């Protein structure tokens, strides 16, 4: 079971790194917002896997807070991009 | 029973992680913002949901409602973000219109007398390089 958790975390970390490349490269603000949203999703997924791996539930509130922050953050940022047409 | 639980969690975790990886690859490889949106939303909804269900199967029953709450937030989050990003992309001319077969919104806007695009085109993302005329990929 431990190997399974390691493999899952490894795949998630690889996915997160690929998303970070898109986050850095852009080229538009919208791409970055989307990539950031996906990164947060992968952090949530990794936290859930780690929680199961270590068999403790300390990180449970972290999941909820991250999910809420991801929502508020990306919606606000996308709205700002729409308002400021120059920021592409 | 424990073995069954472990197997279910293993399958769900691996499938979810693979969906996240595929979404990340798509986010990196696809050419314009809306295509990337399509790839990203798979990782955001299906990938995360599978992993959360896997965790809920393995953890004590009392934690399932909290994980359900996270899943619900994410199910609200992904479509709303995608819709707003897609709309903003359309309005800021980030959609590669030469690669579209049908553009119902443009027809609708033209019928209502408020066309958004006069000139029609879009500058392809510079970093992708290449010939802007090759549309088949």
Image (cartoon, coloured by chain):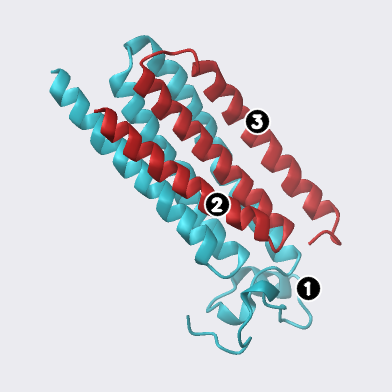
Q: Name the residue under label 3.
A: A69
**SS type, badge 3:** helix
The subunit letter for the residue under badge 3 reads A
B31 sits to left or right of B126: left
Kindly report the distance in space between the C-alpha atoms of the residues bearing marks 2 and 3: 18 Å
The image shows residue A85 at horizontal and vertical percentages of 84, 60
Which-is-in-front pick, marks 1 and 3?
Answer: 3
The image shows residue B93 at horizontal and vertical percentages of 73, 70
The image quarter in which residue A74 lies: top right
Disc 2 crowd rating (10 Å Cα; few below 14, some 14-19, many 20+) is many
Q: Name the residue under label 2.
A: A19
Total numbered labels: 3
In the rendered image, the vertical position of residue A45 relative to residue A21, given as above or below: above
Disc 3 crowd rating (10 Å Cα; few below 14, some 14-19, many 20+) is some
**SS type, badge 2:** helix
Which-is-in-front pick, marks 1 and 2?
Answer: 2
The image quadrant where one finds the N terminus of chain B is top left
Kindly report the distance in space between the C-alpha atoms of the residues bearing marks 1 and 3: 39 Å
Residue at image location 47% in from the left, 28% down from the top: A47
Q: Name the residue under label 1.
A: B113
N-term-proximal mark, 2 vs 3: 2
The image shows residue B125 at horizontal and vertical percentages of 67, 73
Colour given to chain A in the rendered image: red
Q: Are marks 2 and 3 on the same chain?
A: yes
Residue at image location 43% in from the left, 38% down from the top: B48
Which chain is displayed in cyan in the rendered image? B
């Amino acid at each position: 079971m431990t190997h399974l958790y390691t493999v899952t975390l490894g795949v998630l970390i690889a996915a997160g790194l690929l998303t970070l490349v898109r986050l850095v490269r852009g080229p538009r603000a919208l791409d970055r917002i989307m990539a950031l949203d996906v990164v947060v999703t992968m952090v949530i997924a990794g936290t859930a896997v780690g929680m199961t791996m270590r068999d403790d539930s300390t990180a449970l509130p972290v999941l909820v807070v991250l999910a809420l922050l991801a929502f508020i953050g990306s919606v606000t940022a996308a709205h700002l991009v729409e308002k400021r047409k120059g920021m592409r | 029973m424990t073995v069954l639980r472990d197997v279910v969690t293993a399958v769900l975790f691996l499938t979810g992680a693979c969906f996240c990886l595929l979404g990340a690859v798509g986010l990196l490889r696809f050419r314009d913002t809306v295509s990337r949106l399509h790839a990203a939303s798979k990782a955001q909804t299906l990938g995360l949901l599978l992993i959360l269900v896997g965790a809920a199967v393995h953890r004590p029953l009392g934690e399932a409602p909290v994980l359900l709450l996270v899943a619900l937030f994410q199910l609200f989050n992904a479509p709303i973000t995608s819709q707003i990003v897609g709309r903003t992309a359309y309005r800021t001319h980030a959609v590669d219109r030469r690669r579209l077969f049908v553009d119902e919104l443009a027809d609708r806007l033209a019928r209502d007398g408020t066309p958004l695009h006069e000139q029609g085109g879009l500058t392809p993302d510079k970093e992708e390089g290449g010939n802007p005329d090759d549309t088949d990929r």
